[in-house]
Amino acid sequence: MIDLRALTKSFGSNHVLRGVDLVVPTGQSTVIIGGSGTGKSVLLKCILGLVEPDGGTITLDGQDVREGDRDAFLARFGMLFQGGALFDSLSVWQNVAFRLLRGSLQRPKDEAREVAIEKLRRVGLSPDVADLYPAELSGGMQKRVGLARAIAAEPEIIFFDEPTTGLDPIMAGVINELIREIVTEMGATAMTITHDMTSVRAIADRVAMLHAGKIRWEGPIAEMDETSDPYVQQFIHGRAEGPIETLR
Amino acid sequence: MSAGAITAPLALLGRATLGLLAATGRRALFAGETIGHLLRPPFYAREFWLACLNIGWLSLPVVGMTALFTGAALALQIFAGSTRFSAEQVVPSITAIGMVRELGPVLGGLMVAARVASSIAAEIGTMKVTEQIDALTTLSTHPMKYLTVPRVLAATLCVPVLVGVGDVIGIMGGWMVGTTRLGFNSATYLKNTWDFLEFWDVGSGLVKGAAFGFIVAIMGCYHGMHSGRGAQGVGGATKSAVVAASVAILAANYLLTEAFFSA
């Protein structure tokens, strides 16, 4: 279980997170929704230690994430980045097997390649793709490779940062299905940030809405449509009129 | 005249000086952190060899051409100056000393700065804006160890080799001009070069090369790691890396020359 308490983060005078309280239950898929620039990505990066929070606490299974062995902590996570974040200088299979080729999870090269090809198959890519370079792939294929890399070391917790951004609706649907299937079969804890409501409905067990630096609403996906919170209602129905200010 | 009118320029000068010191300090801390990571495992051998290929082998043509033309021009200039004192026989030795002590390492370092600092800053800057550096961290790989250490070590080891090769090519450039344009006997030219060249002339140039290689890679990595967002950010990082590396090479050259050769 990931437990965030009174988490704050500012960049200069821009107070992005103003006291976030959130529990991400083990084995469930939690989706954070919210408008652009509300700090969803910053929230994920704070948990992973990529951004240092100004205040508050983050615990994983009761232990402060800033204490203890950082490598062991990171080994529990996989992450799919918004743009894929594949390493240009490495082939597809080397990207997927990155964690298996070095560090504490290192395996022989042949074995790592086999695992990479198996994970590529799992995300619907043929072994022919393994020796290509990221620049030779389409956006959808890069997302799949990113997903294969995120699950290659079979992490307990997987983060998905805007997994369907920039994809056509069909490919977005494919990625959503893959995420749902993989999270279910691995029994992983998943945390996804998105503003794509189709993704939310496909992926989420629980939903939390981040607005004005705080969690505005959270609950099971089944309760999202019924909530009377005007912020949630405006967001999920994509209305221009409502309490959330929009720029025109 | 009001007191503000007098103190305003001083305040401006003070701010600029403090800014320069702070910027220098940040780069020095980055260099110190790099050395710290260099001394602790893990070490990424594949990245190191790729960096050696890029920094050393692929820089050879540009450094070689620079040395060739510089050696040739230097021989012509020394000949033109020495004829005023009827001392034309010093052309081979002064050309060689000028190349190995000063022009070889400095021009080689500047050419490597232009070629390598820019490419390192652009590559790492692009990795930063496309979240590849964040991805490295989430994959339990320290970006300093994976990106900075191999490049800095490769540059520190390869640039002295480039300088050594450049020295030989530069001396050959002087020899070509000396024997074809200035009427020197080939054997005499080479003998004069060899006889007057001392070990420390060459050694000091190689030490300078190592220092310049270190500076080039540190500046490339630092500015790449601190790149701004988007194409403009990466472009700015690239430009800053080349400018900072070039200025730092010239400053370090003066300091090292003072340390090695001042009486």
Image (cartoon, coloured by chain):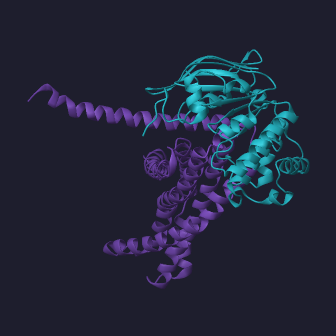
Chain colours: A cyan, B purple
Q: Is residue B142 visible?
A: no
State the quadrant of the C terminus of chain A: top left
Q: For this view, does B77 lie left or right of residue B127?
A: left
Q: Residue at x 76, y 60 (%)?
A: A132
Residue B229 placement (x, y as % from top left): 51, 44
Vertical comparison of B248 with A64: above or below: below
Please determine whether, in this image, residue B261 is positioned above or below residue A184: below
* Residue sitting nearer the eye, A34 or A186: A34
Residue B176 sits above or below residue B230 on the image: below
Q: Would residue A102 be found to the left or right of residue B123 on screen? A: right
Judge by depth and name the residue closer to the eye, B177 or B163: B163
For the N terminus of chain A, which image quadrant?
top right
Residue at image coords 51%, 24%? A212
Q: Residue B8: horizontal and vertical position, in percent?
A: 21, 31
Front residue of this view, candidates B221 and A82: A82
User: Percent from the top left, x then y, of residue A190?
Assistant: 76, 31
Residue A44 % position (x, y): 65, 30
